[in-house]
Amino acid sequence: MPDVVQRGLEDVVALESKICFIDGHKGRLIYRGYDIRELAEHSTFEETAYLLWYGRLPTGPQLADLTHRLAALRTLPPRVVELVDRMPADSNPMDVLRTAVSALAIFEPGELRPGPSSIGGAQRLTAVLPTILGQFHRRRAGLPPLEPKPSWSHAAYLLYALLDREGSALETRAIDVALILHADHELNASTFAARVTASTLSDLYSAVTSAVGTLKGPLHGGANEQVMRLLAEIDSVDRVETVIKSKLAAHERIMGFGHRVYKVEDPRATILREWSRKIGEAKHDLHYFELLRKVEEIVHREKGLYPNVDFYSGSIYALLGIPHDLFTPIFASSRIAGWTAHVLEEYDDLRLIRPTARYVGSTDLSYVDVGRRP
Ligand code: CMC
């Protein structure tokens, strides 16, 4: 029996994967052999999803086919629409997403009901997450009902579902880049949760339900919303130093900083910083960007920490007019590609994931009848 406890499974290599590589010391992120900087510059979410699922970049016809297929799979079964419509308007959208994905497994019509290891299921879930979010958000905001927009990309449809307007080319590209950057990240907590579920030979929808619940936490995907709370609390550049120092003195975590794997700057933060500036300039509003830059300077000076993917993303979404509680669901609408690619890989090379714990409790107590207990 090994005697070393790796709390949080830190530095434990749990499995082999061909999907994603992170070099935490050099600040590199690779999907299936391609550097994230190249993908963010040249690719689209659909192409990146194809790469993650099939292990290679698509040809033109393959990409057109996938884009068409995702758009054709956007419609929810009426029973799921009904369920989402019954959710209280103040529900957390991540709770809505988790519940709707779980319900979808029950209400999918026969022709869409996927096999346990089906790539069709991966594409169906990817296509439908923006619809679930749009269905919920538009009803609570009193916006007109969703139309499927069959010729629109995943990024354009997601933006429309959340805003009720067509994004400009720059806005849509900003979302597309954010979707590419968030699409996978090796064995992050939510992907691990999905693989643990799949490793019991449970189905894809159950694995994604586990993943959505895990992404919700503020130490994972929930950090982007918390960054916006921090900016609201700080309010002006001249207060950054005081607020950050007092939080650090109180041993509070500054959201959007630090990472289990990256020891240098997260390459996704580098790209999103540039997009935060670009969108700020386009909107003639650099308030968030200036605050974020100052926070970054002070946190790095005081703690030596670098920003992660969640630090700049919220400022981009907020400037597009997206409500803060939809930021983590946007993350999910991208990471779904990675979750499902990992689940399919797990099914292909299955080994039940079941670590052990070192027991530190008692072993020699004698049972006392309930009436005689002190
Ligand atoms: N603010 C202040 N101090 C921090 C932070 C932070 N954000 N992150 C790490 N530290 C400190 C921590 O207090 C500890 O200091 P000390 O050794 O003096 O006690 C040291 O750095 C090491 O921290 P750790 O908790 O052992 O590191 P970890 O690998 O467990 O943490 C983390 C990784 C992401 C949970 C952590 O950095 C954190 O809580 N960050 C804030 C939440 C956040 O931004 N999450 C998004 C992560 S990236 C995207 C994603 O996964 O969704």
Image (cartoon, rainbow, N blue to C red):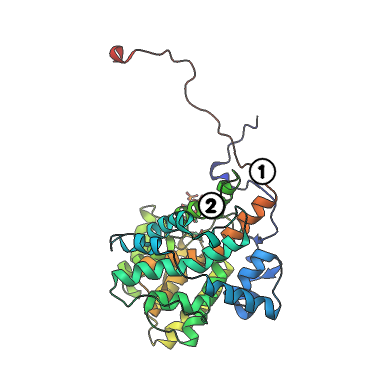
Relative height, residue 320 to residue 374 (above, below):
below
Q: Which residue is mark 1?
A: 351
Label 2 C-beta lies within 8 Å of the nearest ligand 1 atom: no
State whether residue 319 appears in this view: yes
Q: Residue at x 31, y 72 (%)?
A: 235
Q: Amino acid at mark 1?
A: Arg
State whether residue 241 appears in this view: no
Give the spatial CA distance, label 2 vs label 1: 15 Å
Question: Tag on residue 207?
Answer: 2
Q: Residue at x 35, y 53 (%)?
A: 250
Whole-percent x, y for residue 372 in the image: 30, 11
Earlier along the polypeptide chain: callout 2 or callout 1? 2
Q: Residue at x 57, y 60 (%)?
A: 121
Whole-percent x, y for residue 69 in the image: 58, 73
Secondary structure beneath disc 2?
helix
Label 1 C-beta lies within 8 Å of the nearest ligand 1 atom: no
Q: Residues within 10 Å of mark 1 (few under 14, many from 20)?
A: some
Q: Amino acid at mark 2?
A: Ala
Using the image as rendered, state which of residue 276 and residue 326 is in the foreground.
Answer: 326
Q: Residue at x 65, y 61 (%)?
A: 20
